[in-house]
Image: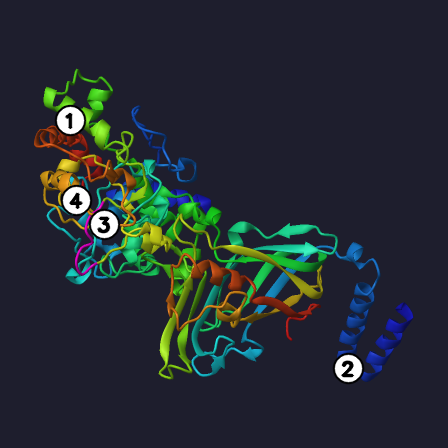
Amino acid sequence: MIEYLLILYNKMKSLKNIQYLFLALSILTISCSTDDDSSENLSGENNLTMEFDNSVNGDDLILNTTAYTNSNGERITINRFNYIVSNFVLIDSEGNEFTYPKDESYFVISEEAGLNEVQLTNIPAGEYVALRFGVGVDQEKYLQGAEGQGDFLQTAESTNMLWSWLTGYKFLNFEGSFTTAANIEAQDFKIHMGSHGSSLDNYKEFTVDLPTKALVSSNLSPIVHFKVDANQILDGQNKILLSEKSVVMIDEVKSPQIATNAAAMFSVDHIHNGENHDH
Amino acid sequence: MICGLAFLQGCSSNDDSAYIAIDENLEVAIPVNFPEINYDLGSNPITKNGFELGKKLFYDGKLSANGFISCGFCHEQRTAFTHHGHQFSHGIDDLEGTRNTPAIQNLAFQTEFSWDGATSHLDLFPIIPITNEVEMGETLSGVLAKLKADAEYQRLFASAFEDAEINNENFLKALAQFMVMMISSNSKYDKYVRNEDNIEFSALEKEGFAIFESKCASCHKTDLFTDNSFRNNGLPPYPGLNDIGRAAVSGSLSDNYKFKIPSLRNVALTAPYMHDGRFGSLESVLNFYNSGVIDSETLDPQLKQNSRLGIALSTEEQEALIAFLNTLTDNEYITDSRFAEY
């Protein structure tokens, strides 16, 4: 190893090419992280970045332009796709859990506002194999009143995620227009899902497995690339027909079904391990 | 830096306008005849400066889009903080809401707020009127921007909160501190049940109290005179409004036309009555319970017992009940200078 680096060093000196230095460093990195009991060697802490790549049934989600046909026989155009993700827990290969500080664990993802990235900071070193999180804001947080909400109230207000007639958050704000075979005239739809006061809690948590380990250490900060399938909202486990009801905000039956569907939107497409944030 | 700040404060203490009063905790005196407090004082301890800031905010039109509609615009102290004489409350640009302003009193003891329980936390309640387009028509961000630009508020927030920040947490906490302190517990009724000041009920008031306990107190429970529940009391839906009440919050058909049981404290002052302010007098309210209740799927079962709708109340009983309801008026509360605008 050392000899190899010396050779490289000499080569670099002779060629005066800075790129060799990076090559040498990356070899060093790879040789560390490919070690069998590498988790023993990961130390320190670092960021873990999550990229929420919004899509519709495998296609890019493009606001206001593309019409997507779902299995309910409805063609929808999406004008707004915003949601809250929260309460992140990282699970490592041995089943240990790291819970991100609750007060800092609420984020709005908004296609229209270009909010697609969440950075978790000071994550302890480890080999993470799964993430658990929720869509929306749990009752425990809401019932902490002014103290619990912090500045998140304004984040939610400025991203159309705050209800005003019903105080509380919209967990999901999904709007657009749709047509059916029977009705080719485009009609608006609005899906606002959140908890119903003290009556019905629509906050749902779920675990998403990572296709490869996400490695965190003092010099490794991974990017977890989520694929988020907006098609699930109407066309998931529960079939929600817009032709039946095109504005769903507070509905004892449909809102919990939409919450269940939204919890299934998330899968991790790939992980970028390393120190470089470009991908 | 710290020395510098101390020096600045030392200098400015000679100047009234920049004087920062030393903060102190305010005790929330819980009346002995009340149930337990619901508000978590630990998360928002009441201080003198926090309370005074909350009061200033309560009476400040800056909280609305046009700068004129304060909380106190609809919540007037002399009528137990209701909008007297208005069936539906007026808001910005003279737009009208669809509901009647409820009284503000003893909120720290309650678990659900607004007629339909749109929030179950007092701190978060002000968001509703502030952002409602027919009430104050503002945004939280808009309010905070105005407060941040105001030198006096900068000073007041710094005097009330350790971090000195003008943010929504401190803004809502200050308003809550003011509202938590708004306790009405010194009516003739309170003094009678607490055996204070040798207060006695007249024969008619006693009779009314007995009728109240047998016919009204199952919903207007405890000395708060509400059980915090939502019920359909059998009002025919108001033509053209069709306000479904609690169902708008819960999404449940079984909650159609249910509204929060209001407290009856200071009820003699808070006309008009009902969530839509349709009745102008207590006599009309009692007449309605006696003979105006209509049946529907969600009518409260207590209002259809023994194959009769409503609550049987003879003229004499109604007269006695009204005498009793008048004992719930708390003149100390409606004249308490701690809560007064001027």
Residue occupying the point 81% across, 71% down: A27
Chain of the residue that carries numbered disc 1 in the rendered image: B
Return the residue at label 1. B208
The circle drawn on residue B71 is: 3
**Along the viewing direction, whichever of B79 and A279 lies nearer the viewer:** B79
Q: Is residue A104 left or right of residue B49?
A: right
Return the residue at label 4. B76
**10 Å crowding of disc 4: few (<14), some (14-19), many (20+):** many
Q: Main secondary structure of the magenta part?
A: loop
Which of the two discs, 1 and 4, labels the residue nearer the N terminus?
Answer: 4
**Residue B235 magenta:** yes
- Disc 2 to disc 4: CB gap under 8 Å: no
Chain of the residue that carries numbered disc 2 in the rendered image: A
- Disc 2 to disc 3: CB gap under 8 Å: no
Q: Is residue A163 visible to us here?
A: yes
**Residue A67 magenta:** no
**10 Å crowding of disc 3: few (<14), some (14-19), many (20+):** many
Which of the two discs, 4 and 3, labels the residue nearer the N terminus?
Answer: 3
